[in-house]
Image (tube, rainbow, N blue to C red):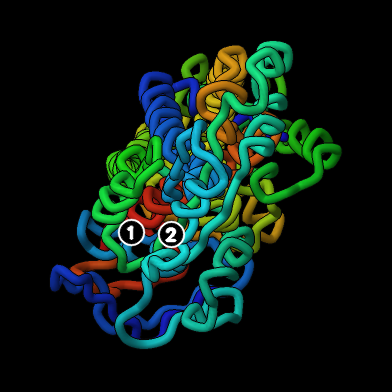
Amino acid sequence: MINFSNVTKVYKSGTEALKNVDLEIKRGEFAFVIGPSGSGKSTMIRLIMKEEEPTGGELFVNGIDTRDIDRYEVPHFRRKIGVVFQDYKLLQNKTAYQNIAFALRVTNTPGRQIRKMVPQLLSVVGLLDKANDFPCEMSGGEQQRVALARAIAHNPDLLIADEPTGNLDPHTSLGIMNLIYKINQMGTTVMVATHDQTIVDTFRQRVIVLSEGRITRDVPEGIYGD
Amino acid sequence: MHIIGEVITNLNKNRVLTITSIFTVFIMLMLVGVFGIFLLNISYNSEYMDNMLEIRIFIDPNADEYRENRVREALLSDNRIDYLAFQSKEQAFEDAKEIYDKEVIEGLGPDFLPASYTVRLREEVDADKFVAFAEGIPDVYQVDYHAGSFEFAVSLANWVNLVSGILAMLLGVLSLFLISNTIRLTMASRSAEVIIMKFIGATESRIKLPFLIEGITIGFLGAAISSVVVGLVYNRIHDWFYSLGVDEVFLSGLSLVPVRETVLLVIIVFFGLGIMLGMFGSMMAIRKNLKV
């Protein structure tokens, strides 16, 4: 699903964010990417999303060399990748329903299909009764659930979660991670960048450790510490 | 349909800047309208302007045929003349009956008006010297030459065009920047939306289109308001001009372009310019501030 082959990323400022990274995440796999701030986790996500280009090496996502994707194909490429962020990135002036519908509408999904899909997605994340609530009326966990529903709206092959529990209490975090795990069980490849030791230790999935732009540890069913 | 809704919401959010942008487009187009309509009317009256360059030489109404012929010979032998046309007393009398009150003219009789020559000089000839010469011909009663008015009209037209042209250009640039700034602000207020659209896979055109339409809407509204104002004002001027009867009395031959024709041209030019300004203003903002 994701294949980094000797990937290096040096920003214009001279910062070397990734150094000769080799990594393969297989289809249907669940992987945690952990490491301190500045270790290269966000750069890895930006490269996968084709927000940035590698300065060296090759990166394949879903079997496609990201260098071969031209700018007009990028949106279609991104529809196959769902993303959730620490700060949820919900539109504050739209309800839970409208936030999800918005994601479908701007990708030209027909209205009838949107009306059918949004309640289904809300139901998957357990928020059907909150459809008409605005983000400010919801808890952090509920907002992240809406963000998750939006991320899987296009039935992506890959779900990337960038610090999905960063703003949540341990109990809510567990609920969100259970949901992400459930999505993985339905066949979606999942990559979670996190600092949350409890979560990593609880789920015992593959753990990839990044430090100063290099992979220093990569273990199946790993834990946060050594 | 959703995009139109987005456009209306965004323009409303930055109401003050939107109105300022529309107003600048409006003023700019008004200036274009003023000098455009002025030019249009000058070219519409080009025949009248040409006539201003003609010299009318009137012969003493009491002169007999012999004396009239003396004037004729003096003019015919002058090689500075390019074109010479004679109007007899009778022709002048008939023409006057068409222009002035028929009964009054008939009461005056055919001998009242003088015979005249209409002269056009070769280009290189000094008209003032020729006028002095013509005034010296025996039995020449009056020499009319309106070059002064013509030169005044031409220099006025040139000044109006120059000043309006420069102002319109400056305002054009200003409206371009104002529109661009308005769009930049709506982009800033929607930055979260743009980021979300990017990562959920909205196409570049879908992200940019509302901003482009916003600019075009500003240009369109500016054009609509200025078209209405210019149309109404020109209609007023047209009515006023003809109510004076100026075309029939003391400025025979001078006329204004019909309102319908003018308004149609104004609408085409204004909407074309307004929409183009809006589009380029938006494109400037998009190019500078939106990385998709």
B144 w.r.t. B100: above or below: below
Q: Quadrant of residue A209?
A: bottom left
Residue type highlighted by circle 1: Ser
- Check the residue under mark 1 and report the chain it is in: A
Q: In which quadrant of the rendered image does the C terminus of chain B lie?
A: bottom left
Between residues B96 and A190, which one lies in front from this camera angle? B96
Percent x, y of residue A176: 52, 38
At numbered mark 2, what does the secondary structure look like: helix, strand or loop? helix
Residue visible at 57% across and 46% down in the picture: B65
Percent x, y of residue A117: 78, 39
Q: Which marked residue is nearer to the observer: mark 2 or mark 1?
A: 2
Residue visible at 69% across and 60% down in the picture: A187
B35 w.r.t. A109: above or below: above
Residue type highlighted by circle 2: Leu
Percent x, y of residue B112: 58, 24
At numbered mark 1, what does the secondary structure look like: helix, strand or loop? helix
- Check the residue under mark 2 and report the chain it is in: B
* Structural crowding at the residue carrying mark 2, measured as other residues with C-alpha within 10 Å and reported as few (<14), some (14–19) or many (≥20): some
Residue labelled with disc 1: A42
Percent x, y of residue B288: 33, 54
Residue visible at 54% across and 40% down in the picture: B64
Residue labelled with disc 2: B75
Q: In which quadrant of the rendered image does the N terminus of chain B lie?
A: top right
Between residues A164 and B253, which one lies in front from this camera angle? B253
